[in-house]
Image (tube, helix red, strand yellow):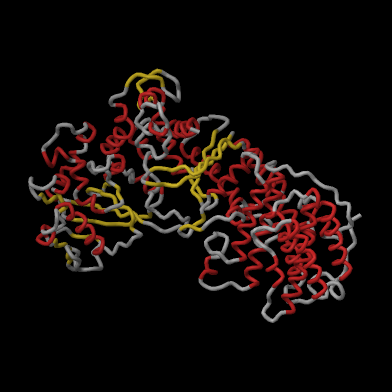
Amino acid sequence: MIQSIRALGQSVRRALPDDPAEVVEQLALASDDEEPGDGVEQQRYLAVLDVYPAQRLLRHVLVEASSAALRRFLYLNLMKSEPGGDVRDVTVRDLRHLLGLVFVGLAHGLLLGERAGVPARLAELEPVLTPMKPALRDFGQGTDRRARFLLDLDGFRLEPPPAVATTEYLTSDAAGRLSVSWQALERLEPKKRSDALARSLRSLLSWGRDVAYFTLALDGRPLAEEPAYRRYVFWYLVERPFAEATLGHCHLCARERPVTSDFRRFRIKTYIIDKTSFASGLVQAGFTRCYVVCQDCYLDLLLGDRLLEQQLETRLLQTPVFVIPEFAVDAPMNYEAVVRRLALVRQEATELDRLRELRRAPEDLARAGRERSQLYAYLTLLFHEKQNMAVKVREVVAEVPPSRVQAVIVAMNRLNDIAQREEWARPFAHERDGWIGGLRDLLYVLPLRRQRGAPEVRPALTLVRQLLQQEPVDERSLVASFLEAARAIASQHVGYWLVPERWGRQTASQREVDAALRQFLNRTLALRLLLADLGCVTRGGVAVDHQIPEPYRSAVEGLQLNAQERALFLLGVLLGRVAHRQFVDSDGGTKPVLEKLNYSGMSLPRVLTFATELFDKMRQYRLLTEHNPAENELLYSIASLLLAAERTKWRLTDQENVYYLLTGYAYETGRIIQRGGQRDATAADSRPQPAAS
């Protein structure tokens, strides 16, 4: 993966002019950790403060805080790599940094006369900042140097004028001319003055929380676009780590060159060399000798690190993910061609996540597969979360070939085609999503807990990895998790993600719970077939040697049910018919027979007892005399024969017993609804259908 990230950066570097000022823009950040991570798009703005010190003029304008804007204005967050150090960012999240601290950080020698130790690249910026010196208020040598200077807005004219006339420390006349309450500000601690002035300026300009970024311009030119500042940034990010470089062998290109082990400026912890305490016997020298890179590889890796956020970050299963390609052919391209190619790669995760919106005919799928195989050799999906300006990895799906991505997409489309075209599978099809809407459905087939309004996705990410890498899946454990989720729906436990949160505020009706349970069970059956189709489980077929009527015969064959699962499925069909009669006959629309199921699991003896009780309910609700008695007796007899034949070699767990009962119930309930709804007394087919020949 490290080599893939380096190759991405190398492709961008080759497409850019050989000019540090041009490269720097690609090293800017495209987002911030403080932004909401729930996937909800919120409009955010960047405020440009344009200072004209000679004219005592302050122009202000808002632009959309897009990734392109953050790159143009160089949102770098350099201060994060050196907490407590000088502020040398010209685009920030906190306005107070631009009202004083940044001038001390960028013009240390100009303001304090202390030029010893000032980087040469930073000294080149002094002529640009010299006109600002008269516009800064100096609180004197007794003040901490970081809080010593503050932008003196007294007499500055705001353009356009503000809508608000007065705030705590600022007052504006009708023309926008400002007055500063310096006496009140000077009563504050020096380190709190810039924050107080920033709050007053925000209030005066009516900037809400949607104004999330701020940048500084002088005389109409953003500081971020000054060549001298860009050269300084390149030195800071790329050249400075090699200031004390030693000769060594680069871990990436193997050449003997000056190398560094300083990776603090990376967002992704590509090399972790500062954690020697996790195992005994490890020493720091071993890391710094082995995990070092030369400057060319360092720059490529840094560009690739930033490129992941700028061009290759998307969401899969409501989780941020980097889609990292490894290209089969390293052909030279210009920058626009590189970006277009990466956009196509990023779309791969979108297609896996939201299949419904991108469904295609078989010939379109085949053509997409050919294009996919030409686009990349492998994909690595890096699921992550951002914390403290670093990326924490949650799951890695490594080196997935395009053929596997194609196989997953084709398999999901095949299930939807079956639900659309095959009569027996019609009850499984959701009116919007088909049988399976994409890998995002994994969020609704597993018992994921709800945490701070989002699902705890770790189990779903593990299942994605197993699917895409064709790893074996323990089907028994999976069915046990299915049953836990079914129990959560039946009990309306809103601590689970697949249970609507509104049920915690208002108790759901029997109809709502039943619909949610049925849709959930339909998704689990789709997942079972998907796992088998993709080689993650091995499931031997069993010939159907009993005269099961249609569509149930096709259903048990299509669902790949063995004899034991088939017996329970047919009992579940009869359970659905009894529950339907109860629902129709009761005033409150209830299904008391479902209370006989134990969602924690049922042993085989308990299943046999349940079968006897179910037969009694069939008699009670006239399913053996009025409502399709011949087919009901046939289904019950087949289920009983299968139970008897398999009793001594029963392999299903207690959880699997209940799960397959529920799948039969969900299937039959779906058929009843399709034939006229729950309240229609004749909804179930009253005529037995012949068995398939």
Q: Position of residue 514 (x, y in %)?
A: 66, 68
- Which quadrant of the figure has residue 232? top left
619 is higher (above) or lower (below) than 243: below
Residue farthest toward the right in the current orientation of the protein: 693
Q: How many marks?
A: 0
Depth order, front residue of 339/302: 302
In the displayed structure image, the side of residue 208 where residue 468 appears, left or right: right
Residue 264, above or below 422: above
Residue positioned 28% across, 37% down in the render: 227
* Relative height, residue 74 to residue 196 (above, below): above
> In terms of depth relative to the viewer, which is nearer, 214 or 413?
413
Above or below 654: residue 371: above
Residue 482 seen in this snapshot: yes
Question: Nearest the camera: 365 or 63?
Answer: 365
Q: Position of residue 216 (x, y in %)?
A: 26, 49
Coordinates of residue 107 in the picture (x, y in percent) = 18, 40
Q: Position of residue 90 (x, y in %)?
A: 27, 46
Residue 296 visible in the snapshot: no
Q: Which image quadrant is residue 521 in?
A: bottom right
629 relative to 474 in the view: left or right:
right
Q: Residue at x 14, y 37 (%)?
A: 109
Where does the C terminus fall, quadrant-wise?
bottom right
